[in-house]
């Protein structure tokens, strides 16, 4: 066994509080990642990640060294051709996909939707019809971490099917917590990372793609080098290697984190998160605090909370919690005073109760 590591409670949307076994999985003998032994570790991780959402026979996980945005950028920059892409923007991460598309000169149409309410699917359909454009792809965030809004990806997938549009999904903060099935939801490409609901260390990001759609990228002129999705895919299939130096220790931790996820199961993990979230929501109500997204559209993963109307300063509240070993997160909405509390990672409702006790004490002192 290994010595315990000081436990901090991260109420942030990733990196999260991890188990000691995941932390210690990083301490391994030095290894050249080009050795077959390490290639086998990556192949195992890749297949296991695919298995969480799809059949490995038809879908493939493509690993990159990088933060989650690397996978989103790989997807947005590598998949669309010359036809138009619709990007749904109802928060900071939808906006980020627009910004990535703009940088690469990709022909995109921005569908704006309220940040605090469900996407109107009929309106999205009218938008597609009225565009008068050849639309090949649609990109959407599954769970908008900006607010905690859970987008109806399955319904958007149905709409895409009717219009022969391939769907790209940023599932960064939903993957491994909210059960999903890429085939059933009609997702062709999905991006996520190692350090959110997977409860691993930061440094690995990945795209899971339908193989038949990946193969279509073969003759596409690359728009970039490191983040080229097809090149990374082809190299991995041929050599069981990433093209460039992988984050070795993060991958060992990820292997352990996947093992622990399988032991818990995605649905049980979501139940645990949901219990923590319900504890949070009822505590907020008791303290007279309000949050942004209606509960029926809520992810139950992160909650965007209005600042108390009293003399409130996020930084000083942050510092108070930090001194108690708890980390909280600022808001990300322009023009609205909010802060965010996530309930993912190796934490339980007990940690949330402790947070609420401290919050009550902090507010009462204002
Ligand atoms: C966290 C997150 C990202 C990626 O963030 P990184 O800081 O690059 O890891 C992208 N999209 C969503 C929805 C996220 O929650």
Image (cartoon, rainbow, N blue to C red):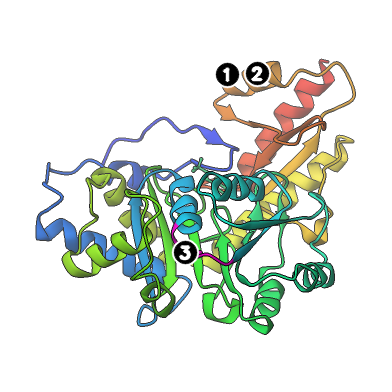
Q: Position of residue 187 (x, y in %)?
A: 55, 73
Q: How far apart in space, not on screen, are marks 1 and 2 (Cα)?
A: 5 Å
Label 2: how many Cα within 10 Å (few below 14, some 14–19, many 20+): some
Q: Quadrant of residue 30?
A: top left
Q: Measured along the vertical axis of the image, is residue 166 above or below residue 322?
A: below
Q: Residue at x 73, y 46 (%)?
A: 147
Q: Please state the extent of the stretch shown in magenta in the rendering.
A: 78-83
Is residue 134 or residue 353 the one in the foreground? 134
Provide the major secondary structure of the magenta segment.
Answer: loop
Instruction: Identify residue for label 1.
Output: 323
Q: How far apart in space, not on screen, are marks 2 and 3 (Cα)?
A: 45 Å
Label 1: how many Cα within 10 Å (few below 14, some 14–19, many 20+): few
Upstream in the sequence, badge 2 or badge 3? 3
Task: Determine contact: label 1, label 2, CB under 8 Å.
Answer: yes
Q: Residue at x 37, y 33 (%)?
A: 5
Instruction: Identify residue for label 2.
Output: 320
Can I make out residue 259 in this image? no
Upstream in the sequence, badge 1 or badge 3? 3
Along the horizontal axis of the image, is 207 left or right of 133? left
Task: Indicate the secondary structure of the residue bearing disc 1.
Answer: helix
Instruction: Identify residue for label 3.
Output: 79
């Amino acid at each position: 066994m290994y010595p315990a590591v000081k436990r901090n409670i991260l109420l942030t949307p990733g990196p999260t509080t991890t188990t000691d076994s995941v932390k210690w999985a990083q301490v391994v003998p030095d290894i050249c990642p080009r050795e077959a032994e390490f290639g086998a570790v990556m192949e195992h991780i890749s297949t296991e990640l695919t298995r969480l959402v799809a059949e490995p026979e038809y879908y493939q996980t493509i690993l990159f060294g990088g933060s989650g945005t690397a996978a989103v950028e790989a997807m947005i920059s590598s998949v669309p051709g010359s036809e138009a892409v619709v990007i749904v923007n109802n928060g900071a991460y939808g906006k980020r996909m627009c910004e990535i598309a703009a940088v690469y000169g990709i022909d995109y149409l921005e569908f704006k939707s309220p940040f605090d309410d469900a996407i109107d699917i009929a309106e999205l359909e009218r938008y597609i019809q009225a565009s008068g454009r050849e639309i090949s792809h649609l990109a959407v965030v599954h769970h908008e971490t900006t607010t905690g809004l859970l987008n109806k990806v399955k319904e958007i997938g149905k709409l895409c099917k009717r219009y022969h549009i391939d769907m790209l999904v940023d599932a960064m903060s939903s993957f491994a917590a909210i059960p999903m099935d890429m085939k059933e939801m009609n997702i062709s490409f999905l991006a996520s990372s190692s350090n959110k609901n997977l409860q691993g260390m930061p440094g690995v990001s990945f795209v899971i793609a339908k193989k038949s759609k990946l193969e279509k990228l073969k003759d596409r002129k690359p728009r970039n080098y490191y983040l080229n999705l097809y090149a990374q895919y082809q190299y991995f299939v041929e050599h069981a290697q990433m093209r460039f130096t992988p984050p070795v220790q993060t991958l060992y931790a990820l292997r352990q984190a996947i093992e622990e996820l399988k032991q818990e199961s995605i649905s049980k993990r979501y139940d645990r998160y949901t219990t923590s979230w319900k504890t949070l929501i009822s505590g907020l109500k008791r303290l007279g605090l309000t949050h942004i997204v209606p509960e029926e559209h809520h992810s139950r993963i992160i909650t965007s909370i209005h600042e108390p109307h009293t003399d409130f300063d996020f930084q000083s509240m942050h510092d108070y919690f930090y001194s108690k070993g708890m980390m909280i997160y600022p808001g990300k909405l322009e023009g609205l005073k909010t802060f965010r509390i996530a309930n993912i990672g190796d934490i339980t409702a007990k940690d949330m109760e402790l947070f609420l006790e401290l919050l009550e004490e902090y507010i009462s002192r204002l």
